[in-house]
């Protein structure tokens, strides 16, 4: 029995040796070769990642340089004075300064572009656009909204060092404004000016037109004691008089030509819908109705369905 078992073991030893050697070789390949392959994979991945990151960095730098170059090549517009000489034409002057005839015509209020006088002074804006004189209560935000342009373009065109500080009467260049927009705004200003608004009441302005508390404030708030008289800013017809949500009790006057004024948060209404009122006529009393934090008048100027800064139209 032992003899047979010994013979079997002798026959099995070569097979076991082969299995052990095979296992050893496989283990060696796994640990040595696997680590090597893993290392190569890591190196290759790291190389590709670095190459991708470097490529993106280069692309970003190229784009940044292109933008800087474009700004450097684009000259900032300026306002010049030009004296008309013999033989000058509006077309020739516009061509010389690379601006449109429309820009020259509007800027200089020329009724007839074909008649220039020798010695006549012309204002030349060295880029298409308009000049906007700053009115009381205006900000870059409200001005940019009026002309549907960006604050950044206005700051750049005028090289403003302190964009948060504007002076009343300061002339700002509004670049790239289409003539139609200028005409529409001029018509609005002319119509409103013809009305000759008066203050609905005289007191301290507690809140101005524009962004406020994460929302847009569509008028100005004038603080006053409850019961203070509110007067019509101009002649008009009462389009609405009553409760209107957050406005509380309010009066809406229609002055014609697409111009309206709103008087909100009142405590007492003294007019009715359809009634004709005269400028200076008392139409309501100051209150604290609707969404309000204290007695005051919320006053709006609405032109063609859009609110405007009331301080641009009040004396």
Image: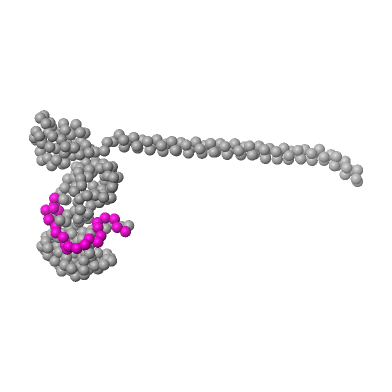
Check the image and report above or below for 261 versus 14.
Answer: below
The x and y percentages for residue 208 are 24, 58
Quadrant assignment, res 263: bottom left
Highlighted range, magenta: 190-213
Check the image and report above or below for 240 versus 83.
Answer: below
The x and y percentages for residue 246 are 27, 64
Q: Which of 260/279 is in front?
A: 279
Q: How is the image coloured?
A: one colour
Quadrant housing the C terminus: bottom left
The x and y percentages for residue 28 are 70, 38
| Residue at the (23%, 59%) spot, across then down | 220
| Residue at the (28%, 47%) spot, across then down | 162
Check the image and report above or below for 97 versus 164.
Answer: above
Look at the image and tell me whether residue 308 can be seen. no
The x and y percentages for residue 76 are 26, 38
Viewed as shown, does residue 298 lie left or right of 121?
right
Quadrant assignment, res 225: bottom left
Quadrant assignment, res 262: bottom left
Residue extending farthest top: 87
Q: Which of 153/100 is in front?
A: 153
Say if the magenta span includes residue 201: yes
Number of numbered discs: 0
| Residue at the (27%, 42%) spot, across then down | 159
Viewed as shown, does residue 217 lie left or right of 276?
right
Look at the image and tell me whether residue 251 can be seen. yes
| Residue at the (21%, 59%) spot, across then down | 300
Q: Which of 283/167 is in front?
A: 167
Say if the magenta span includes residue 267: no
């Amino acid at each position: 029995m032992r003899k047979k078992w010994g013979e079997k073991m002798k026959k099995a030893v070569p097979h076991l040796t082969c299995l052990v050697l095979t296992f050893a070789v496989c283990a060696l390949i796994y640990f040595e070769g696997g680590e090597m392959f893993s290392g190569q994979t890591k190196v290759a991945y790291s190389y590709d990642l670095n190459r991708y990151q470097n490529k993106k960095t280069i692309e970003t730098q190229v784009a940044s340089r292109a933008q800087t170059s474009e700004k450097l090549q684009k000259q900032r517009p300026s306002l010049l004075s030009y004296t008309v000489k013999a033989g000058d034409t509006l077309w020739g002057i516009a061509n010389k300064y690379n601006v449109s005839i429309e820009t020259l015509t509007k800027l200089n209020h020329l009724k007839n572009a074909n008649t220039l006088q020798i010695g006549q002074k012309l204002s030349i804006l060295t880029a298409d656009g308009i000049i906007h004189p700053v009115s009381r209560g205006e900000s870059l935000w409200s001005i940019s909204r009026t002309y549907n342009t960006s604050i950044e373009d206005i700051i750049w065109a005028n090289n403003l060092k302190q964009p948060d500080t504007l002076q009343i009467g300061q002339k700002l260049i509004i670049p790239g404004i289409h003539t139609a927009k200028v005409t529409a705004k001029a018509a609005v200003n002319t119509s409103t000016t013809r009305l000759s608004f008066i203050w609905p009441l005289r007191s301290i302005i507690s809140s101005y037109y524009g962004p406020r508390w994460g929302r847009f404030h569509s008028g100005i708030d004038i603080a006053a004691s409850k019961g203070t008289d509110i007067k019509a800013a101009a002649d008009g017809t009462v389009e609405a008089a009553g409760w209107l949500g957050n406005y509380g009790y309010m009066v809406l006057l229609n002055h014609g030509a697409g111009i309206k004024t709103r008087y909100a948060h009142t405590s007492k209404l003294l007019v009715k819908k359809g009634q004709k009122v005269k400028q200076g006529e008392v139409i309501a009393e100051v209150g604290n109705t609707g969404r309000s934090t204290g007695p005051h008048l919320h006053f709006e100027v609405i032109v063609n369905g859009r609110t405007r800064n009331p301080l641009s139209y009040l004396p």
